[in-house]
């Protein structure tokens, strides 16, 4: 319970920092995407943004609840979920970065492929 609260606080801090960075960039006249979108750049190469790469079997993440994405990433990292790729990928991201990515994907409206 305490850990969950601490994690939520950490995620909120990260989000606030991302917003701060985004508004600083806006003040400089630079149109920066949100930090979650930037951190998701690798994911987008396979999962796409609003829709996955056409013709691929790769699952769509757009609109998926953030908690489900975060749980899947924890399972992959702990090798509790099997797959050829995601285990390797998931071990390269900390919980805070995964939370940012998951929030960004959860907020995307899914499009038909
Ligand atoms: C090289 C291609 C590739 C990249 C890059 C990639 N994924 Fe995946 N992902 C897959 C494939 C393929 C699957 C299908 C299941 C499997 O192989 O484990 C998958 C499955 C998933 C799932 C499970 C979806 C479900 O339906 O439960 C999640 C969540 C996920 N990926 C998140 C991410 C995130 C977050 C990133 C970026 C940090 C990412 N993936 C990067 C290929 C990729």
Image (cartoon, rainbow, N blue to C red):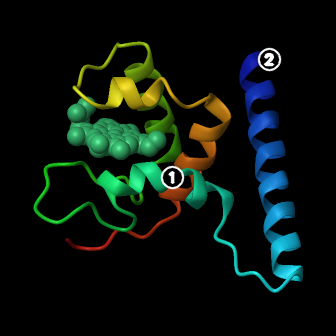
Task: Name which residue lies at 39% across and 57% down.
Answer: 44
Q: Position of residue 52 (x, y in %)?
A: 27, 60
Mark 2 beta carbon near ligand 1 (under 8 Å): no
What label sits on residue 2 in the rendered view? 2
- Does the image show residue 21? yes
Q: Please state the total of marks drawn on the protein image.
A: 2
- Does the image show residue 1? no
Mark 1 beta carbon near ligand 1 (under 8 Å): yes
Dot 1 lies on which element? Answer: loop
Task: Name which residue lies at 57% across and 38% down.
Answer: 98
Closer to the camera in the image, 59 or 1: 59
| Residue bearing mark 1 | 40
Task: Name which residue lies at 67% across and 35% down.
Answer: 96
Q: Position of residue 103 (x, y in %)?
A: 58, 52
CB contact under 8 Å: marks 2 and 1: no
Determine whether 82 is above or below 101 in the image.
above
Tell me which numbered mark, 2 or 1, is placed earlier along the sequence. 2
Q: Where is residue 77 in the image (x, y as percent from the top left)?
A: 44, 20
Give the distance between the C-alpha atoms of the residues marked 2 and 1, in whole angstroms.
28 Å
Looking at the image, residue 6 sits to the left or right of residue 107; the answer is right
């Amino acid at each position: 319970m305490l850990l969950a609260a601490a994690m939520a606080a950490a995620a909120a801090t990260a989000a606030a920092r991302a917003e701060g960075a985004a508004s600083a960039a806006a003040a400089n006249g630079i149109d920066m995407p949100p930090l979650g979108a930037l951190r998701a750049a690798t994911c987008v190469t396979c999962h796409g943004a609003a829709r996955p790469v056409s013709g691929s079997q790769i699952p769509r993440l757009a609109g998926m609840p953030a908690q489900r994405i975060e749980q899947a990433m924890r399972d992959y990292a702990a090798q509790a979920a099997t797959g050829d790729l995601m285990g390797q990928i998931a071990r390269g991201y900390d919980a805070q970065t995964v939370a940012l990515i998951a929030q960004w994907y959860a907020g995307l409206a899914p499009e038909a492929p």
